[in-house]
Image (spheres, grey):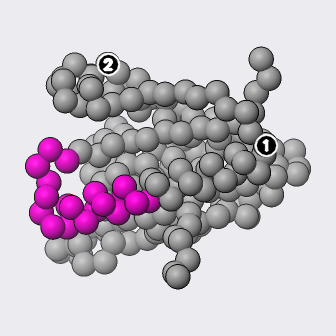
Amino acid sequence: MPEEPRPDRITDLSRLKAFTNPLRMQLYRLLYAAGSATASQLAEQVDQAPSLVSYHLRKLAEQGFVIEASGRSTDGRERWWQVASEEGWGFRESELAGTPEGAAAVNAVTKGLVDSRSAQYRVYLDQSAAWGREWADAAFSSEWMLDLTAPELAELNEELQALSRRWRERGKAARTAGDTVGREHVSVHLYGFPFRP
């Protein structure tokens, strides 16, 4: 049985620090959603100069997060970019936060991810009426209170990732087959963490 695809696991602090810059995080997320884009196209979306966006894309490329999208350029003047892996990336806090510098980077990146995801959800909430009833009824926001051990929480995470991969592949196959009517990008945010009331 083939091994399940996994996100790129960051184990080197210098790679993680690439995402302490909020613009790089935003560019990566936009590129992930778009599939591929040029620095100029991304610059319009983030309201920044194409030269600045190009600089940050090169920095992400140096760390292996984005690569040039082959076969996209029609005139050779503009570089097209894409994320290096459809599986995205992740890290274990315990592997990187052992020093003050590592703890600061982990904290900055994690908070940046939460802020970015929250902002994306707030935009949806502000625009939810424009999506219509079908999308409003399909969208969800859920929270479950579970009593788990750390290994059980890790197992739940694995199951949720496998489920998400299956749905991502289903959507990708449908788009490839030309089934695009009514198909939109959907963002699913799940968090699992311990707390004490």
Residue, far front: 147
Residue at position x 37%, y 49% in the image: 30
For residue 48, above or below residue 15: above
Q: Is residue 45 left or right of residue 157?
A: left
* Range of magenta residues: 165-183
Q: Is residue 40 visible?
A: no
In the depicted structure, whether residue 15 falls above or below residue 108: below
- Residue plotted at (64% across, 38% down): 192
Q: Which residue is mark 2?
A: 126
* Residue count near mark 1 (Cα–Cα under 10 Å), binned few <14, some 14–19, many ≥20: few
| Amino acid type indicated by mark 2 | Asp
Residue identified by numbered label 1 = 149
Could you tell whether 85 is left or right of 75 in the image? right
Residue in front for this viewpoint, 191 or 117:
191
Q: Is residue 140 above or below residue 158?
A: above
Mark 1 or 2 closer to N-term?
A: 2
Amino acid type at circle 1 is Thr
Using the rendered image of the protein, determine whether residue 103 is visible from the camera's viewpoint: yes
* Magenta-drawn stretch contains 118: no
Mark toward the viewer: 1 or 2: 1
Q: Nearer the viewer, residue 150 or 115?
A: 150
